[in-house]
Image (tube, rainbow, N blue to C red):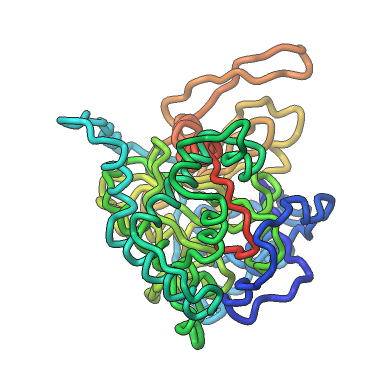
Amino acid sequence: MQLFYGKRATVVPAHPSISDDEGSEEEDDDVADPDFLPPTHNLDTPGPSDIGPSAKRKCVQPALEVLEEDDDDDDDDDDDDEEPAPQAKRQTKKGKPAARLTTWRKADLDNPALPEYQHCPPDFTDTPFQYFSMYFSPQIIKHITYQTNLYATQKNINTTFTTTEDEIMNFVAILMYMGIAELPTVEEYWAMEIRVPQVANLMSLKRFRLMKRLVHFNDNTQIPGTIDRFFKVRPLFSHLNAVFRSEPQTPKQSVDEVMVAYKGKTAGNLRQYIKNKPDKWGFKLFARASEDGFIHDMVLYQGKNTLEAHGVLLTHEQTAMGVTSQIVSVLASTMSSSTTTAIFADNFFTSLEIVRYLKDKNCRYMGTARDNRIGRPPLKIIKEMENKAVPCGTYDYVTSDNGILALRWKDNRIVTLLSTDMGAEPISSVHRYCSETKRKEQVSCPAVIKSYNANMGGIDKSDMLVHLYRTPMKSKRWYM
């Protein structure tokens, strides 16, 4: 899947407090230009995916014993086609450690299957409020109450304003109920003709608007000197992250991007664009989720300072990786048991370096990969497999000396995977439409492909559940 990120020609906020303006809180979602097509490259992310080899590479067949170069941040395929001299091979690149020598052989993986996760029913069922309190604890409600009163005092908007923990709970309850019982506008919950008592009996419309304007999560006086562009919501975010990590995790975890929908323009280039996401405009998060759709860990993307603002100190081994591989290593570090877990990710995150890193920690990995990130294993050339004479379902695989499988399979497009979990065997079959016979035909499908398709959907399931109940929170304060 190709991902496109564009940066608008907008002014980046000098610090997070720029969004606390005194204008109208309501903002039209259509203010963003729907016809804007961002550039296909972003300086902070790797280049386009699924690009086949150049004409020069087609003539070069890698030897079985090759020295892998760090191509994570290098999209210039022409430079990779030249065979470097032995002395040049062992030079470090961009201050990174020397490349590791890898031997590839025609062999398959034979790992034991991971244990199946059993959802044990609880001894008794809690009330909905008890489940809610597991994540929104009394401590975080108390924190929001204090910060809201402090913010009202600092802004001097209404010197008589004060709120309580019960009122904050009512405010959150109203927002949640509005996501379940949707109406075209917020005002209609208090309208005489269609008044909704579950909302209108808790709080007046005037008070709700004031609360939405003043609710706050962090002290603005602490902003000077911080590099965290999500300073406004960091306490709430950190609290939820800690609770999510404590939940039971399934043996199969998926890592992917999550978009928090936002079309406003007050967040500068914190707002990202991803073409193939349901919410194309918004704030980007990197998340790790169980196969049942429960997210266990998240990282808020904010450019080059993403991990530093997240409070992460990278090791020397992690620093040598590409940026997206670092994200996977950070998300994997909070897993409850890495030795009985497999991580699934797409080609945005996969590289030979992250697969090695996780294997050294006894954590399995499986993911589609871009051709310039797999270390040049001796697989069939992409251009040759794209030939119409090569039937759909054709595959080729090799395994490295340290147990990393590289596989290339012809589907509607050429797919390349790296895996330390499943191998190519056993070969099953899937149905694919054949343009020549005008009907679906059975084609061969390696086990690693079938496993990837079955276990990559944890983040997608989470996105689906979030979209079922969307909270109507329009505000000029982008962090809301």
- Residue at the image position 46 percent from the left and 61 percent from the top: 299
Q: Spot the residue most to the right.
A: 35
Residue placed most toward the observer, 204 or 67: 204
Quadrant for residue 17, please give it.
Answer: bottom right
Q: Considering the image in quadrants, where does the N terminus appear?
A: top right
Tag count in the figure? 0
Indicate the position of residue 83 as horizontal and vertical percent values: 65, 66
Residue placed most toward the observer, 353 or 7: 7
Instruction: Judge whether 295 appears above or below 270 on screen.
Output: above
- Residue at the image position 44 percent from the left and 67 percent from the top: 217
In-image side of 89 versus 433 (left or right): left
Q: Can residue 161 be seen in this view?
A: yes
Quadrant for residue 381, please give it.
Answer: top right
Indicate the position of residue 460 as horizontal and vertical percent values: 52, 39
Residue placed most toward the observer, 456 or 287: 287
In-image side of 297 versus 375 (left or right): left
- Residue at the image position 57 percent from the left and 68 percent from the top: 302
Instruction: Judge whether 463 appears above or below 229 on screen.
Output: above
Indicate the position of residue 129 as horizontal and vertical percent values: 30, 41
Instruction: Judge whether 153 appears above or below 148 on screen.
Output: below
Residue placed most toward the observer, 305 or 175: 175
Instruction: Judge whether 19 appears above or below 66 on screen.
Output: below
In-image side of 257 versus 52 (left or right): left
In-image side of 295 versus 52 (left or right): left
Quadrant for residue 94, please give it.
Answer: bottom right
Q: Spot the residue most to the bottom.
A: 225
- Residue at the image position 47 percent from the left and 78 percent from the top: 153
Q: Considering the image in quadrants, where does the C terminus appear?
A: bottom right
Q: Is residue 86 visible?
A: no
